[in-house]
Image (tube, rainbow, N blue to C red):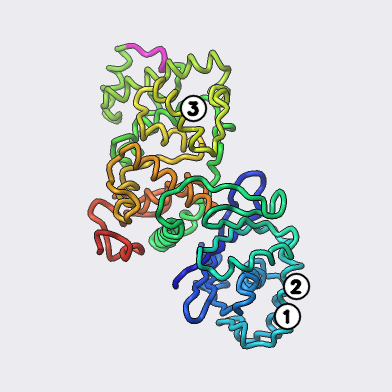
Amino acid sequence: MGVTAFIVVGNRPGFTPGIPNPGYLLLLYENDRPAWELIPLYPELRKDLGNSKILIPSIENMLEDALLMIGIYVVKDEELIEKARRIFRDSLERRIEIYAFDRREVEDLRSIARRKLQRYDIGLIIAPGEDSTILGQLEVLREYGDLWYQVNLPDKKLSNTPGFFDEIPLQEHSDSPRWEYTEAFWKILNKLEEKSIDKKKFRRGIEDFNSYRERFRKMSDDEIYSTLVQVVFYSGMNAKTVSKKMPTILKYLGDFRKVAEYTEEDIRRIMDDRDMIKNLKKIQACIHNAKEFQRIVESHGSFVNYLESFEVDPTNYRDIKTKLVPELMKRFKGIGKVTVYHFLMDLGFGVMKPDRTILRLFHRLGWLPTSDPTAENIERTIKICSEISSETGFWIRAVDITLVAFCQEGGNQGLGIPAGICTRNPKCLECPLRERCVLHK
């Protein structure tokens, strides 16, 4: 049957959806002999644990045995570990086969976990598939008190916050099973970390992008305008070239108050600089945008006030698409049907830029009918990435940068990735998804 459920372990969240700092992944394999595999997602976490730990659960307590693993190997509760060493002995360091030990002693362990896990700063996203045994064991979560968890079912979410099992409808998603999306993402993330020449840099970079949620609220007008300029220049151009030239670009175009006053003479001066990207259309777009940006700031007091005037839920794609996207495309030049999502994504809205490389990846995986940036493909791509974000606890900006680094020719230097894998000429032998890929088939 393969993987029938997974659990993401991170920190207990505050007032935002998802879990911060996801560090461990538990996979449930329900074959002839069911097994939980606990996988640390970062090198630092593997020093003590190794690449993974295996536990063979009892059928009737399959979900609780996963929570037992979390108590022993993730939070490392001293009382649990001490008793587990007495019961499991050497198996604790290798593979635990629950059914091979005294049932009463194992049940004592579970009772300790019920009492102790809720005291730790952890949050769980529990996602059982349609055929998973743990679907019939969810009620036991009531016995874990204040332990924070969210249960994502195929057709709804259940959470113990703010009340037990509050039902929240899932956003509409495509026909492909959500397992395919999230499992593919975890494989990509792990492959990139393995490929990174600097593992600490990789983890720090992903965590930075994971903190993008609603960041516009803390950004100054200058920071937002600088973001707009960068988005305009990155659009349709070689990312390495733009990154190299960005200090010069911002030197001339980074201050909207000055740029709004530019004349034809200023444009000639900019075009004469050998370190500048000599794209007249983009330079003129930035000058137009500076004037428009200044008008907005003067009329609303700040660009943040302007954004908030639309009364848009920053996590609601439909809201963003219908209220904010048309207005930004109308007012700013160089901001098209794809680029507008890049701008909003970098401001911390819950959308992502459906980059051509991601469209190509999703088409190769059979999730899109073509790799063309049609309105339907753009919307479907954003929905898939939103679902990955919801299921894994990673903010959508972190999902986006992970996928782009996997597909982009130059990888991502900021994450220590020298080159992508699913590029125009893909490196299929390196790809962890080749068995799913239409090219491989």
Numbered disc 3: secondary structure: helix
Label 2: how many Cα within 10 Å (few below 14, some 14–19, many 20+)? some
User: Mark 2–mark 3 contact, CB under 8 Å?
Assistant: no
Label 3: how many Cα within 10 Å (few below 14, some 14–19, many 20+)? few
The amino acid beneath tag 2 is Ile
Q: Report the residue marked by disc 2.
A: 112
Numbered disc 2: secondary structure: helix
User: Mark 2–mark 1 contact, CB under 8 Å?
Assistant: yes
* Residue 87 in magenta stretch: no
Q: Indicate left or right for 223 with 355 as reference.
A: right
x and y, in percent, of residue 87 in the image: 69, 85
Distance from Cα at disc 2 to Cα at disc 3 = 50 Å
- Residue shown at the point (58%, 50%) measured from the top left: 18
The amino acid beneath tag 3 is Lys
Q: Report the residue marked by disc 3.
A: 323
In the picture, the quarter occupied by the N terminus is: bottom left
Q: Nearer the viewer, residue 394 or 159?
A: 159
N-terminal label among 2 and 1: 1
Q: Disc 2 vs disc 1: which is toward the camera? A: 2
- Residue shown at the point (27%, 47%) measured from the top left: 370
Q: Indicate left or right for 406 with 36 as reference.
A: left
Distance from Cα at disc 3 to Cα at disc 1 = 57 Å
- Residue shown at the point (69%, 67%) measured from the top left: 140
Q: Report the residue marked by disc 1.
A: 83
Q: Is residue 88 above or below residue 129?
A: below
| Range drawn in magenta | 259-263
* Residue 261 in magenta stretch: yes
